[in-house]
Amino acid sequence: MTADLLLEGRVFRGLAGGFAEAVAVKDGRVLAIGTRDEVAAAAGPGTRRVALGGRVAIPAFNEAHMHLLPYGLGLTQVNLRAEEVRSLDEVLGRIRAAARAVPKGAWVVGRGYDHSALDVGRHPTSAELDAAAPDNPVWIVRTCGHMGVANGAALRVAGIGHNTPDPEGGVIERRGGGLTGLVQERAMRLVQSAMPKPDESQMVDAIEAACRQLASMGFASATDMNVGMTAGMAEVGAYEAAKAAGRLPLRMWQVLAGNPEGIAEAAWEAGLRPMAGDDSLRWGAVKVFADGSAGGLTAAFFDRYVPADTRGVFTFPDETIHALLRRYHEQGWQLDIHAIGDAAIEQVLQGMEAADSPAHPFAGRRHRIEHCGFVTRDQRRRMLARGILPVPQPVFIYEFGDTYIANLGRERSEYAYPMRTWLEEGHHPAASSDCPVSTVDPFINLFTMLTRRTNRGTVLGIEEALTPEQAVHCQSWCGAYTQFAEDRRGTLEPGMQADIAVLSQDVFAIAPEAVLETRADLTLRDGLSIFDRHGELA
C-alpha cells in the first residue's frame, strides 16, 4: 500500500509511544510510523513528502473547553483584552471609536477587559461608558465571562432599574442606591437577552472563522461548551448548516447549555439525543454552572477571599443543581459542569455521587468538572473513583495567577490547576483555554504547564510543572479521551486518524521561553491540510 504523504523528521507519537523519525499517511489514517527506512518503504512515485528539518510533528491539538461560536462572533467585537488594554482611557477610547463606526442606537459590544489589570484597578462604570458612547447601548464583558458592565442605554433596554431584584445566582451591583452598571453571573442574562441575536448566516461565518483561526494554531478538534446561550436553538441549526456547507474545518464536540435558561430541555424535546451526529459534529454533553470566577470574586470557596468579605457565589442551591445533574445524567448526557472553587466542586461532587445508581451507573460515562481549579485531595480521590474527569485551563495561571494571589492568598494559589498531581494520580486532565476567556494560543498553555509562570513572571507551584511530552499529551490525547475519541485520535499510531500538527520548532528540545515563539506551520485533519502556512502541500 502506497502512502499519500510522508512527514520525515522528528515525530511525537504520544506519551506512551515516544518519538519516531517519520510518519506515513494513507486515506486519512496513519499508515506507518517508525524509522526513516521503515516508513520509506511505504513511499511510491505519487507520495508527497514534507521534510521537517528542525521542526516536529505531533498529534494535532484538541481544544477541550472553549466557546467556539462566541469566539468567532467576538472576532468582530471590540477587543479589550489585557495584553492590549491596560488603562481605563484605552477601554473608553476603543468604545468611543466603535460607537462612531455604527449608527446611533446600535449596540457596541466589547470583550476581555480585566479590571485588576487596568490602571484604575476597578471596573469601568456605567456613567463612564455613557460618556464614551452617549447614543448607543454598550455592553462590555470581563475576561472571565462571568460579569460585565452595561451603560445606561443598555440597562434601560434590559429593563434593569435601581429596584430590579437580583435573580437567583446573580448580582446587580448598586452603590449609594444607584446602579454602577456591573452585572454578575446569572444576572447577565437580563442584558444578553435584550441584545439582537445573530442570524444563521452570521453564525456560520463566525463558526468557520473561529475554526480557521484554531487550525492556524495546530488544532484539528475543538469544543463549543455552552451551545444555545447566544441565539438559543438557532445555534444547533447553524452548526448543522456549517457542516452541510463544508464550512466546519474542525471536529467539534458540542455541549448544550443546561441551566434553566439554556436549551438542553428544548433540544431534548426536539429529539436531540446524546452522541447524535458523527465524528465531525457530535452532540455529547450538557453544561451547568455551579459558581463563577476566582478573578471576579464569584467562584465559591470554603474560605473567604482576601480582599472582600465573601466566599463567592453559588449559581444554584444544592437541591436545584443536584436535580439538574441527575436529570441530565439519567437522560444519558455527559455532564460538563463548571466549578472552580473548592466549595462549588464539593457541591457538584455530592450531586454527582447522589446521581450514581445501579439503574444509571457512572462507570464509563466520563462526566467532567470543568476548570476544577482549586480542588482538595479528598475531592480528587472521589473523582478518580467514579471516573470524573478534570478539564483545567493551565493558561489561567499565566493570565490570572497574580490576581489569584491577590484574591486568594499565596498558599491557595500555589496549587491551583495541579497538572502533575492529576497525572500522577491517574487522572486525564485535558488542558484547554476557555477561550475567549483566555487566549486560545496553545503555546502559551504549553509554556505555563512547563514553567507555572504568570505573565508577570511569578512562579506558582513549580512542583506541578510538566515535561514537554506530558504537556502535549494533556493538550491532545486527554482532550480526545474526554470526547470518547482516544481510539481514533490523540496519538500517531497505525490506524489512527491523521490529525497532525507540524510545529515551527521542536517544543521538546527548546527552552520554555522559546515555546512562546512557536507556531503551527501545517495542520492536517484526516491527512488533508486545513492550514498550510508555507504552502508545503499546495
Image: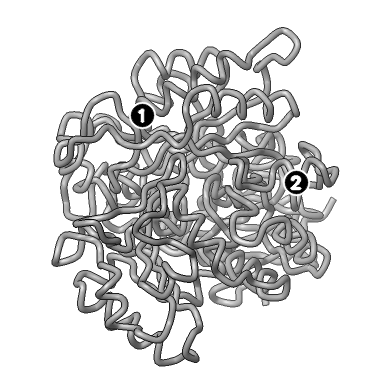
Among the 4 quarters of the image, the one containing residue 95: bottom left
Among the 4 quarters of the image, the one containing residue 293: top left
- Residue, disc 1: 420
Say which of 264 and 114 sits in front.
Answer: 264
At label 1, the amino acid type is: Arg
Element type at marker 1?
A: helix
Say which of 38 and 211 sits in front.
Answer: 211
Residue 94 x, y percent position in the rendering: 32, 81
Residue 240 x, y percent position in the rendering: 79, 60
Against 380, is 297 above or below?
below
At label 2, the amino acid type is: Ala
Element type at marker 2?
A: helix
Q: At 20% across and 78% down in the image, what residue appears?
A: 89
Is the residue under label 2 in contact with that under label 1 (CB below 8 Å)? no
Q: At 64% across and 50% down in the image, what residue appears?
A: 23
Q: Residues within 10 Å of mark 2 (few under 14, many from 20)?
A: few
Residue 366 x, y percent position in the rendering: 62, 27
Q: CA distance from mark 1 to mark 2?
A: 40 Å
Q: Is residue 348 visible?
A: yes
Query: In which quadrant of the rendered image does the C terminus lie?
Result: bottom right
Q: Earlier in the sequence, mark 1 or mark 2?
A: 2
Against 70, is 415 above or below?
above
Judge from the rendering whether residue 402 lies leftward or rightward of residue 393; answer left or right.
Answer: left
Residue 299 x, y percent position in the rendering: 35, 38
The label nearer to you, 1 versus 2, is 2
Against 184, is 241 above or below?
below
Q: Residues within 10 Å of mark 1 (few under 14, many from 20)?
A: many
Q: At 25% across and 29% down in the image, what residue appears?
A: 463
Judge from the rendering whether residue 339 lies leftward or rightward of residue 517; answer left or right.
Answer: right
Q: Is residue 470 visible?
A: no
Say which of 382 and 163 sits in front.
Answer: 163
- Residue, disc 2: 266
